[in-house]
Image (tube, rainbow, N blue to C red):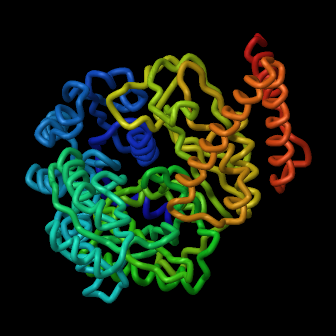
Amino acid sequence: MLHFFFAPLFMFKKILIANRGEIAVRILRACRELGIQSVAVFSEVDRKSLHVRLADEAYAIGPAPSRESYLRIDKLMDVARLAGCDALHPGYGFLAENPALARACREARVTFIGPPAEAMEALGSKTSGRQLARRVEVPTVPGTNNPTEKSEARVLAQSMGYPALLKAVAGGGGKGMRLVYSDAEFESAFRDAASEAMNAFGDERLYLEKYLERPRHIEIQVLADAHGRVVSLGERECSIQRRHQKVLEEAPSPVVTPELRRKMSEAAVRLARAGGYVNAGTMEFLVDQNLNFYFLEANTRLQVEHPVTEQVTGLDLVKLQIAIAAGHRLPFAWESITPRGHAMEVRLYAEDPENNLFPSPGKILSRHTPTGPGIRMDEGVYEGWTVPTDYDPLLSKLVAWGNSREETIARLRRALDEYSITGIRTNASLFRRILEEPEFLRGEIHTRWLDEFLRRSRAAAALLTSDQNNESDSNGSREVSAIAAAVWQAKQIATQASTASSASETSSRWKMEGRRELLDRMP
C-alpha cells in the first residue's frame, strides 16, 4: 500500500530545501529516493556544508547572518524561480512556521510542503492555539488566552498563585520565557521576557500560564491530508530538556497507558481538524503526576525528533509530507498504526560539557560514527568540515531502536561508546551520564529533571574540589588530593556498575580509546 502511495501518478520534479544542516540532508535523501531533484541554498559560511555537496543543485543566498540569508523570503523565492522548483520544503527552524513563507509560495505557484498559512496562524500562535483548544474542549494549562499586559498578568499570577510562567506569544525553544516565583520578581521577569521575545521573534507580546510542578512533556505526531483524513502516529516523550530545549526524546513514553494514548490522540486529531491542518504537525501537551494532560502548543512543521516516530512506526514522515503536499490521500487510519518496539534519540551538539556546555565550534579533524543493530545517525557534518559559530550547534542525531526500552538504552550506550570526534568538543559524555542515572532508567523524569541533575553534578564537583583543596592545605601535600580524587573516582565507577542494569563489568574508556587508535593505524 505504501509503495503505491510513494509511486503516484503525480509527484514533484524539483524541491527547494529552505534550510541547512542535518535536516536539509534528511530531506534531500528522501527526495533522491523518490526520484525528485533537490535544490539547496547556502550562506557564505555554509558553502562547503554537506547538504550543499549532496544536493543536485545549490545556490548562494547571502552572508552568514540568518537575517541576511536563510530568513530572506525574497531570496528563497528568487532561487525557486531560477531553479524551476515546483515545491519548497522548509525543514524546521528558520522560516518553517512563518505564514509569510507559505503565502509567498502560494503567490509564486510553488507548493509549500507544510500546512496552509491559515492553519499556522490558527495553531502556531501560542495564544490562538490555546483559544482553539478551549473551543474544541481540549484541556489547557490555566492562564491567559490572549496577549497580556504587565498589570493584568501580575493580577492573574497573584490569583492563581506562584510559580507562574511568562511565555512569548511567538515563542519557541525557551526564548522569551521566564519562570516567576514571587510578586517581587514579576516586573523584572516581564521586562526581560518581552525584550528577549522582541530580539528573537520581532514580537514582544507575552502570555501567562500557571506553572505545573514536575510535569512531563509529551507530544502527539499527527498527519493530515487535504481530503479530510487526520491520523495520529502516537506519542513522544520529550521531558529531558535543558533550559526548555529538548535534548533527548523517546517513543513511546514510559508512562503513557493505552487509554491515555487514545485520549491524547483524539485531542490532537480534534485540534488539527478544527485548525484546518494539512501535512505533518505536532500537538504538544504537559502531563502532570496524576496523568492529567493539558494542551501546551502546536508545532506546525516537522519536528527535530521525528526519527523516533519513524523507527517505531516504520513510516517515512518526510516522504509522507511530500506525498500529502502533492495531493495524495493518506493510505491508513490512525487506528491501524501500532508502534513496534522502543526508540530513543539524543541530540549531539558541538558543546563543551566541561565548560557549562558552551558552543565548541571549529574544524572536525576526525570522526567515527556508530553502526550496528538498531542504530541510525542523521547528521550534516563530515571530517574536515568547520562547524560555524553562526547557527545552532546541532551536529547529529543519534537514534537507537530496540524491542524494549531496556534494549534501546543498552544499544544507545554502546553507540555512544563507539562515537568519537576530534577537533571540537561534543555533549556525548552528558548522555552517557544520563543513561546511567537510576531515575532515568526507571522513567522517573520531568521537564526540570535535567537542569536539576546538572546543578547537582556541578555542586558535587565544586564540593569535591573544595574538599581536595582543604585536605591539601592541611597536610601540605599534593599526594592527598590525588588519593582523594582516586577514591572518589573509584566510588563513581562502583556506583555506575551497581546501577547499570545491563552491565556485568565496568567498561574501560582507556582500553576502548587504545583499541580505536590501533584500528586507526592499521593499513
Quick check: can you spot residue 111? no
253 above or below 178? below
Residue 319 x %, y %: 42, 55
Position of 128 with respect to 163 (left or right) is left
**Most distant residue in the left direction:** 107
**Residue 16 makes an appearance in the image:** yes
Q: Is residue 419 above or below residue 251?
A: above
**At x 17% / y 32%, what residue is drawn?**
68
State the count of labels.
0
Which residue is drawn at the image coordinates 23% and 26% (left, top)?
60
Please report the residue visible at 16 percent of the width from the left and 66 percent of the height from the top.
150
- Which corner quadrant of the image does residue 13 belong to? top left
Residue 365, image x, y percentages: 56, 16
Q: Nearer the viewer, residue 195 or 371?
A: 195
Residue 148 spot, x, y in % from top left: 16, 70
| Residue 186 image-quadrant placement | bottom left
The residue depicted at 46 percent of the width and 68 percent of the height is: 219
Q: Quadrant of the C terminus?
A: top right
Q: In the picture shown, does residue 175 fall above or below 464?
A: below
How far across and how far down the image is residue 444, in percent?
65, 66
Residue at the far front in the pictured view:
474
